[in-house]
Amino acid sequence: MQIYIDGGFYSESEAKISVFDHGLLYGDGVFEGIRFLQRQGLPFGGTHGSPLQIGCGDWIEHPTRLIRSDGSPPGDRPSQRAHRRLHPSRGDTRQRRPGPESLELPKPTIIIIAAKITLYPQESYEKGLKVVTCATRRIAHGALSPMVKSLNYLNNIMAKIEASHAGAGEGLMLNEQGLVAECTGDNIFVVSGGKITTPPISSGALAGVTRAVAIQIAGELGLEVSEPQMTRYDIYTADECFLTGTAAEIIPAVELDNRPIGNGNQGPSPVV
């Protein structure tokens, strides 16, 4: 594993940031996860949205090209499960400017973690995930746009803990209206009668990179994909269900709230 911090490269044991960093103190920052493909050595499907804006009107471009994703020498291709996490925060509070614009810090902290990642055990990909509905709701649009991958990830963590306590591998998060938004770290799709549906972005789902690729490939295969508002009933009565995410890739879900989805097994063949 290699870690880039503000222009320097460090091993896992040597990487450190200031205890005064706004990302640490207040969750004031954002993050992005990018997967690289072995056959191309290129980012899978691009990244979420546009470059990130952190304080002072500065635009921070994705400098992932600066480091090898898994510590391999320059010229080698990243491993198949290579993953890079780009993590900018507003910066060290000791640089704070006096006056009414005191939250504008002149220098953000830029961190990139280069590693290999597998979000779920291999068994879950073979047998499918058990999912439970969480009491913790998705962040409302009026509080913080669900499209922002903020360092303040407490909502998702609380929901993930709920799922873990219930013996499930994932948690389904609803929005304030009780409609399906997404899982704690993945987008959700269902297959019913040969048609694919996924919650719309307006319901609180992240516009995931893998989500977009799944929709694109389904369209190329002639499969109908729609994005209606969804309730848990749509998942309970589906023939199949799968989750998508940069870290998760595509993984089947076979149970929601102790109810089997379809026949309770992974579909006979992947949809995408």
Image: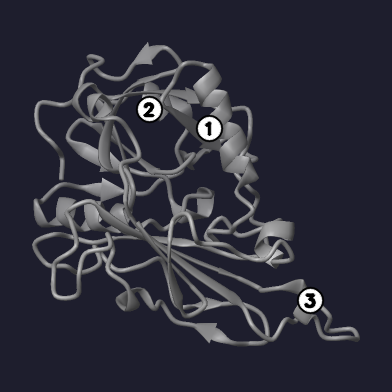
Q: x, y (%) of residue 63?
A: 39, 78
The quarter of the picture where the C terminus appears is top left
- Give the label, 3 or 2, closer to the camera: 3
In primary-sequence order, the first of circles 1 and 3 is 3
What is the three-letter code of the residue carrying label 3?
A: Arg
Q: Mark 3 points at which residue?
A: 94
What is the three-letter code of the residue carrying label 2?
A: Ile
Q: Which of 80 and 54 is in front in this view?
A: 80
Classify 10 Å Cα crowding around label 2: few (below 14), some (14-19), many (20 and above). many
Q: Which residue is drawn at 63% across and 27% down?
A: 135
Q: x, y (%) of residue 256?
A: 41, 21
- C-alpha gap between disc 1 and disc 2: 19 Å
Quarter-of-image position of residue 55? bottom right
Q: Is mark 3 on a helix, strand or loop?
A: helix
Give the numbered dot on residue 160: 1
- C-alpha gap between disc 3 and disc 2: 49 Å
